[in-house]
Amino acid sequence: MTDKKEKTPKQKSISERERAETVARAIMAQQPQLSKTAPRKEKLAWDQTPTLPGQVGDWVDQLAQHVDQFPPVHPNGQHVPEQLEHILMIMAQWYVRKDGKYYDVEEPGPVLSRDDVERVIIQRLKEEFPANALSNDAVSQLLQVLIKDQFVDPRRSIPIWSGLRQSMPGNTRKLSFKRMVATINTWKAPEYRSLNINKPSWGPFEKYMEVTFPRPKE
């Protein structure tokens, strides 16, 4: 029986390097190969969250413990483009899902299939964000994250509906959450609150009150 010769430090270094190169080649072989001639697709930078406007900020605050409506029209009347991140978070507030079906938050009666809701969303994007010339690829990626992806930030995904509708007076949010399941809030602010109401007037008694009580403290 012959004794095996012990490897020298130099031989050990070469062996370890070869093993590392083999592992690296195996990992690279599992990565998807991109064709040089294939058209380049747009990529949505989900991890680069921009400054949040009002509606998105409120939506983030509401779901932050588990991980409303900024207008698409600028106050001066001009349409302004929005960040894809913001658009995705607003889309997530349009619908809820239950048992594989989708329901409009504003009118939860009609039942929509996934194909239905995708087609409706594509048209709503054009109406809600007229300043954003979204390509078909960008819209496809938005729908992928919003509807199909499971391991996704809950702020970017259509929430699960509990099946409950409750009136929550004073709460302007359309959805409330308990254990990450949404309940639809049916309460809406009365229209009279948005009216420009005149200041209180004493009418014909004003003169009488001024004469009777000349001092303001009275």
Image: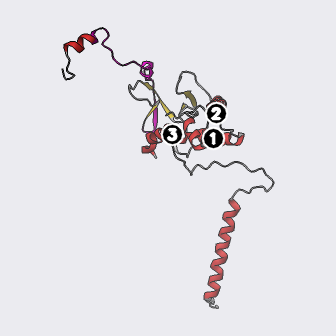
* 64 sits left or right of 126 in the view: left
Please identify the residue farthest to the right as the structure is shown. 37
Q: Nearer the viewer, residue 2 or 128?
A: 128
Query: x, y percentage for residue 201?
Result: 33, 15
Number of other residues with Cα within 10 Å of mark 1, as a class: few under 14, some 14 to 19, many 20 or more: many
Query: x, y percentage for residue 80?
Result: 61, 37
Q: Which residue is mark 2?
A: 125
Q: Nearer the viewer, residue 203 or 175?
A: 203
Q: Which residue is mark 3?
A: 56
Do callouts 1 and 2 mark residues in contact (Cβ within 8 Å)? yes
The dot on residue 142 is: 1
Along the polypeptide, which appears first: circle 3 or circle 2? 3
Image point (74%, 57%), residue name: 33
Q: Nearer the viewer, residue 77 or 48?
A: 77
At mark 3, the secondary structure is helix
Q: Which amino acid type corresponds to the residue marked 1 in the rendered image?
A: Leu
Q: Which amino acid type corresponds to the residue marked 3 in the rendered image?
A: Val
Which stretch did the figure color magenta? Answer: 178-206
Query: x, y percentage for residue 124?
Result: 63, 30
Image point (64%, 73%), residue name: 20
Q: Is residue 192 above or below residue 65?
A: above
